[in-house]
């Protein structure tokens, strides 16, 4: 698996230097870990906002799972997004269990998750471009950060092109004319169908977008608190530098290069913080790992939710069966889109 190989290589590259490892251990011994408490709270608020956003999108489709079950499914998805290797991710579990709750609205459940991802990416784009706009000169003053900023712009350029193409195809009913060999063909149809479903619900979409912005704010806060744990050390970054760096890291980590962004995240924090602000590389990597530990903590809580979760209808299935059922549903969405248009 390419992602596994990339992850292992990056981890080796980051941690192979014994001097850096010794510096990281020394920095950790002087950390003020009390700052991780507000960091954990802020990351918990990220998940609360994620639950509220999905709840809004489900409600648009007249699906009412209740706050408790919606929260449980978000936590279960969090666990599997981080810990499960292979093609079965958190979204598959969320779709499968939500389908069990409302078996007559399977397509609506699927589209709510697709659009949940889409609007989350759109909000990240807005936040990142806004921050990069104010930091443009600083980022372009160095060839290394210029290259990373160019990567971010390329990601968003591809996202915008994909979005516009999907809108055009959907508006002119051209699904049957889109060749199957086009990369991301199925994703294109999924997003187009979701956009068609949600495009007229302006008020609800505004609420979902607002929750996405709040998610970014709380995510920034959790990472900043992780950095504050090392604020007493020489070269430690404050909130300002972290605000510049975090959106770039989060954007590039959305590219499926490694498993859950592991290795990529640490390398980006190391490069950006050291290049822009002179933060020692060992400290930058440690800040990244400490921030990631907050994600791991909440993901483990999600694992507890999974152990005790019981669908309202039907028993549990194997992960393979869940993946197969969601795959069949996605094929059905694609087939219906091509038939109807």
Image: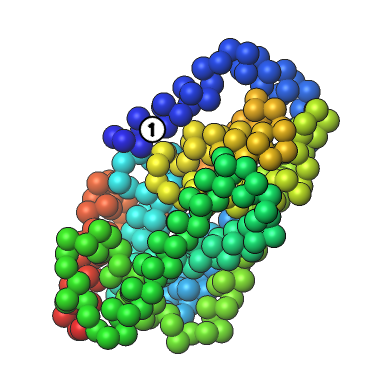
Helix, strand, or loop for circle 1?
helix
Spot the residue most to the right.
232
Locate residue 176 relative to residue 218 in the image: left or right: left
Is residue 254 visible to the viewer in this orientation of the structure? yes
- Residue nearer the viewer, 119 or 149: 149
Residue shown at 76% from the left, 49% from the top: 240
Residue 22 vs 261, above or below: the answer is: above
Residue 25 appears in which quarter of the rendering? top right
Q: Position of residue 225 (x, y in %)?
A: 73, 43
Q: Position of residue 226 (x, y in %)?
A: 70, 39
Q: Which residue is mark 1?
A: 6
- Residue nearer the viewer, 183 or 141: 141
Residue 324 vs 196, above or below: the answer is: above
Residue shown at 20% from the left, 83% from the top: 341
Residue shown at 25% from the left, 64% from the top: 186
Coloration mode: rainbow
Residue 286 appears in which quarter of the rendering? top right
Locate residue 314 relative to residue 27 in the image: left or right: left
- Residue nearer the viewer, 188 or 138: 138
Quadrant of the frame with the N terminus: top left
Locate residue 187 relative to residue 261 in the image: left or right: left
Q: Position of residue 303 (x, y in %)?
A: 48, 43
Is residue 294 visible to the viewer in this orientation of the structure? no
- Residue nearer the viewer, 231 or 109: 231
Q: Residues within 10 Å of mark 1 (few under 14, many from 20)?
A: some
Residue shown at 78% from the left, 23% from the top: 30
């Amino acid at each position: 698996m390419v992602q596994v190989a990339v992850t292992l290589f990056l981890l080796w590259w980051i941690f192979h230097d014994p001097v850096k490892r010794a510096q990281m251990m020394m920095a950790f011994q002087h950390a003020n870990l009390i700052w991780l408490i507000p960091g954990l709270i802020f990351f918990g608020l990220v998940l609360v906002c994620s639950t509220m956003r999905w709840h809004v999108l489900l409600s648009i489709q007249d699906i009412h799972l209740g706050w408790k079950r919606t929260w449980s499914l978000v936590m279960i998805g969090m666990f599997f997004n981080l810990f499960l290797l292979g093609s079965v991710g958190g979204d598959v579990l969320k779709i499968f269990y939500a389908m069990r709750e409302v078996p007559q609205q399977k397509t609506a459940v699927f589209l709510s998750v697709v659009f949940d991802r889409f609007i989350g990416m759109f909000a990240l784009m807005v936040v990142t471009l806004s921050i990069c706009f104010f930091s443009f000169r600083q980022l372009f003053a160095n060839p290394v950060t210029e290259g990373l900023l160019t990567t971010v712009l390329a990601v968003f350029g591809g996202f915008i092109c994909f979005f516009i193409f999907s809108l055009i195809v959907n508006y002119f009913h051209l699904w049957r004319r889109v060749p199957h060999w086009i990369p991301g063909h199925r994703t294109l149809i999924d997003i187009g169908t979701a956009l068609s479903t949600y495009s007229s619900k302006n008020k609800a979409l505004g609420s979902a977008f607002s929750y996405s912005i709040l998610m970014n704010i709380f995510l920034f806060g959790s990472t900043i608190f992780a950095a504050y744990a090392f604020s007493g050390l020489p070269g430690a970054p404050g909130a300002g530098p972290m605000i510049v760096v975090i959106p770039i890291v989060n954007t590039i980590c959305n590219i499926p290069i490694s498993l859950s962004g592991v290795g990529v995240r640490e390398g980006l924090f190391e490069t950006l913080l050291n290049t822009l602000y002179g933060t020692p590389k060992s400290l930058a990597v440690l800040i990244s790992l400490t921030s990631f530990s907050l994600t791991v903590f909440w993901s483990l809580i999600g694992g507890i939710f999974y152990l005790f979760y019981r669908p309202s209808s039907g028993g549990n299935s194997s992960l393979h069966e869940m993946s197969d059922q969601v795959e069949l549903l996605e094929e059905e969405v694609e087939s219906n889109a091509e038939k109807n248009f």
